[in-house]
Image (cartoon, rainbow, N blue to C red):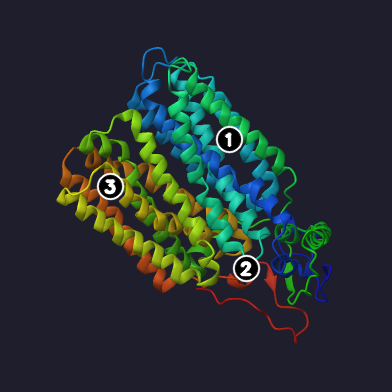
Amino acid sequence: MSASPASSASPASPDSDAGLRTVTTAVPCRLDRLPWSRWHWMIVIGLGTVWILDGLEVTVVGNIAGRLSEPGSGLHITSGQITGIAAALYVAGACVGALFFGHLTDRLGRKKLFMVTLAVYLSATALTAVSFQSWWFFAFRFLTGLGIGGEYAAINSAIDELIPSHYRGRTDLIINGSFWLGAIGGSLLSIVMLDTDFFAKNVGWRLTFALGVVLGLVILLVRRDVPESPRWLIIHGREQEAERLVDDVERRVTAQTGRSLPPAEREITIRQRKGITFLEIARTLFSAYRTRSTLGFALFIGQAFLYNAITFGFGAILTTFFDVPTGRTGYYFAVIAAGNFLGPLLLGKLFDTVGRRVMISSTYLLSGLLLFGTAALFDQGVLNAVSLTACWCVVLFFASAGASSAYLTVSEIFPMETRALAIAFFYAIGTAAGGITGPLVFADLTSSGVVGDTVLAFQIGAGLMCAAGLVAAFTAVRAERRSLEDIATPLTEVPAPDPGTPHSGTSRA
């Protein structure tokens, strides 16, 4: 049904929203009832594959740290400055970018911002490749982080609002897990690019960044065909555009699948407005939805510390305890990265069938308990480099699905009007914990060469992951196969004008 003024139509209250209306529409239901099609694959490829670039970026920088510090690299920079200053600036940029662009995504639209943030990322990466001084390298690491942080908010909000409810969980998990495909590529690419038999010391690392730019440009071309979120359009006074867009999508999906579409079963009534204030967003997250916010904090902090317990000192653990040459640690990292990707890929469907609460809590608890077991075996001295890596693979198979579900959770359990900023807020919390607090906690523990210190690092990460799993067991929202509007009633939704029409919505947690 086309959007139309409700019988009780009235202008929205804020002065800046003058001229907007109260409209009734079935657009969210029409999107959720669509069968999977080539159109949805276009959304996944256009939006989701950027995480491959993120994984490539982060892994490459870690692997080239030693090369950049060598004479003849073209930069006067130390390995410590790369893993310290440059890494901190990248993390700071990601946190700032997530919050800044997340707010703009809610105000200006998903499409505008997922184009802008990718452009920022590509420009900064290209300029990193031509770094001639350390300050230049540092500046563009910050700007690269700024772009990738903005991507998380813009992309996850757009994906969740475009993908049908029956497929939202697995799609979101696999897309976020694709970071690790980039990590595998970054590990293997670094081995080739840093081989001086192929490329000079001052050329190979630059070409690595340039390759990331080329891949990003391909994604940018595909992304041009990804539409704005119809849900966002309706709230912001562009309901006719939303209706035309969904009409076109329905025609394309019907032609691609050969299936007729069932009628939309639910309408919602929206009082349109241009934006939501920070005060309203804060009140929504920390008062009306404080239990869900606690869940978001627990999930992000738990996964951030588990990953830092394992990956922050990854190379140091292998070289210090098992005498693995630094030039070969990339092979081990590629193996655990593969385990990370397989988790969301193979377990993702269960988040839509078995359910969110069971799967989120079980993946967190399992990965934490398995890391406790790994810590015990490491303490007893029964592991070697291969068996330790195998243990990490099993831990991260479950942990990666859990960590990806953290992004899924905060993107679907808060109202539509706050979605991008909510994603940005919790992403910033997790990134800060992982990139700032994590190194402070784990740096000395994993590099001391003392077995007990490394065991303690494992136990801290495992303990916080288990704690998050217990929080999820009691508070995770049963969001599987449910419309976003059922999970969290939009702030702009009003009761339908017909008193006989039931008002569907989830009570606030």
Amino acid tagged 2: His
- Could you tell which of marks 3 and 2 lies nearer the N-terminus? 2
Residue on which the image places disc 1 = 121
In the rendered image of this protein, does residue 405 appear above or below residue 80?
Answer: below
Whole-angstrom CA distance, mark 3 to mark 2, is 38 Å
Front in this rendered view, residue 501 or 336: 336
Amino acid tagged 3: Leu
**Crowd tier of the residue under label 1, counting other residues whose Cα lies within 10 Å: few below 14, some 14–19, many 20 or above:** many
Front in this rendered view, residue 116 or 246: 246
Residue on which the image places disc 2 = 166
Q: Nearer the viewer, mark 1 or mark 3?
A: 3
Q: Secondary structure at mark 1?
A: helix
In the rendered image of this protein, does residue 126 appear above or below residue 403?
Answer: above
Which dot marks residue 388?
Answer: 3
Image quadrant where residue 321 sits:
top left
x 61%, y 34%: residue:
215
**Crowd tier of the residue under label 3, counting other residues whose Cα lies within 10 Å: few below 14, some 14–19, many 20 or above:** some
Can you give x and y, in whole percent of width and height, for residue 217 in the image? 66, 34
Which dot marks residue 325?
Answer: none
Furthest residue in direction bottom, as rendered: 500
Can you give x and y, in whole percent of width and height, for residue 368 in the image? 32, 59
214 sits left or right of 448 in the view: right
Whole-angstrom CA distance, mark 1 to mark 2, is 32 Å
